[in-house]
């Protein structure tokens, strides 16, 4: 008889792309995941993983088992949801994937709140890029995902996934204290020509927004520094090496050498919570969505007290 936990391990490798990433998502060691898959290979008398460079790839037999695992995990999820619904209170494990600034600026308060209100619930967070976490929800690798989109790149939802809007995150310009924009209340997009920019790398939504928007305004952006992390971008601005556009969520306090300036019109990114269709009946999902929205409104209240 096939063991569900071993199927879950193989499914996780399929979703996350490596044994190490699967182990991190499942809360195991890579060795434990490898052992689970080795046992599954003995049970099925089939090779399931093959070496591919420094990583692994799934064999055709493995993909057949992954499809079976998705069906079985969906059945287990439905049974757990129905039991939790009958009890009428959030309980059990809830896995959440969130992009970096939401994981830093929103989820800590939400998770702490859920821990106090619902001790029978075990919410667990993983920091994951939005373009990956949508698929993870669809495949059942996580229960919920917190993602974002912009006006230039609406979020496509795969079949079987639902969403609810958490809130809208305003973006502002960050400039060095001695910059000509630092003394202005706001800056229009037409005024941004000739600036040196600090930005995230190509492929990130912030980068695409900046390039498209400035080109529409008649400017070709000169991106002189690229960084993945917001604190690095802020440090480069503080050193006088350029200006940047940054959402406010998860940004943290600005150093003395950086000034925040409104951009007119204001760029906005939207935050969503995603889950599989029908999972909203599960009290843990409904309560987490409520907590996300509630804590977002608290953040908005605090921001109104500190306007740009």
Image: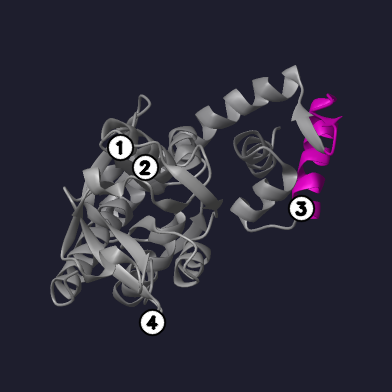
Q: Where is residue 134 in the image (x, y as percent from the top left)?
A: 43, 38
Marks 1 and 3, how far apart at CA? 43 Å
Of label 4 and label 1, which has the lower sequence position? Answer: 1
What is the C-alpha distance between the residues marked 2 and 1? 5 Å
Q: Give the range drawn in magenta.
A: 31-54
Q: Do the residues labelled 1 and 3 touch (CB within 8 Å)?
A: no
- How far is the residue under mark 4 from the one under mark 1? 29 Å
Q: Nearer the viewer, residue 91 or 285?
A: 285
Sort mark 3 into few (<14), some (14-19) or many (20+) by Cα contacts within 10 Å. some
Q: Name the residue under label 2.
A: 210
Q: Where is residue 17 in the image (x, y as percent from the top left)?
A: 67, 37
Q: Quadrant of residue 62?
A: top right
The answer to whether residue 198 is visible is yes
> Which numbered disc flags the more N-terminal residue, 2 or 3?
3
Quarter in which the C terminus is drawn: bottom left
Instruction: Give the label on residue 256, or none.
Output: 4
Q: Which of marks 1 and 3 is in front?
A: 1
Per the rendering, the mark at residue 37 is: none
Tell me the residue at 50%/37% (across/down). 203
Identify whether 113 is placed above or below 269: below
Residues marked 2 and 4 touching at CB (< 8 Å)? no
Q: In this view, does 125 lie to the left or right of 105?
A: right
- List the residue tagged with mark 1: 213
Determine contact: label 2, label 3, CB under 8 Å.
no
């Amino acid at each position: 008889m096939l063991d569900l936990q071993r199927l879950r391990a193989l499914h996780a490798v399929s979703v996350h792309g490596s044994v190490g990433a699967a182990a991190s998502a499942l809360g195991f060691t890579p060795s434990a995941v490898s052992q689970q898959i080795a046992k599954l290979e003995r049970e099925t008398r089939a090779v399931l993983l093959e070496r591919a460079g420094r990583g692994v790839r799934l064999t055709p037999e493995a993909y057949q088992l992954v499809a079976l695992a998705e069906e079985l995990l969906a059945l287990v999820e439905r049974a757990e949801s129905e039991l939790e619904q009958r009890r009428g209170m959030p309980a059990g494990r809830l896995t959440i994937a969130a992009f970096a600034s939401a994981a830093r600026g929103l989820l800590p308060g939400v998770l702490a709140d859920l821990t106090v209100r619902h001790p029978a619930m075990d919410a667990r967070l993983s920091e994951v890029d939005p373009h990956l976490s949508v698929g993870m929800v669809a495949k059942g690798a996580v229960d919920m995902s917190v993602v974002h989109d912009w006006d230039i790149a609406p979020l496509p939802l795969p079949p079987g996934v639902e969403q609810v809007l958490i809130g809208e995150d305003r973006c502002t310009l960050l400039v060095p204290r001695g910059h000509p924009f630092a003394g202005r209340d706001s800056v229009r997009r037409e005024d941004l020509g000739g600036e040196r920019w600090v930005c995230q790398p190509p492929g990130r939504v912030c980068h695409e927004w900046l390039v498209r928007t400035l080109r529409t305004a008649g400017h070709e952006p000169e991106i002189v520094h690229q960084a993945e992390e917001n604190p690095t971008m802020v440090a480069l601005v503080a050193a006088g090496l350029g200006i940047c556009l940054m959402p406010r969520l998860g940004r943290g306090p600005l150093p003395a050498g950086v000034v925040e300036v409104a951009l007119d019109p204001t760029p906005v990114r939207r935050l969503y919570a995603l889950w599989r269709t029908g999972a909203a009946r599960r009290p843990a999902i409904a309560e987490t969505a409520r907590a996300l929205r509630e804590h977002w409104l608290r953040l908005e209240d605090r921001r109104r007290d500190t306007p740009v």
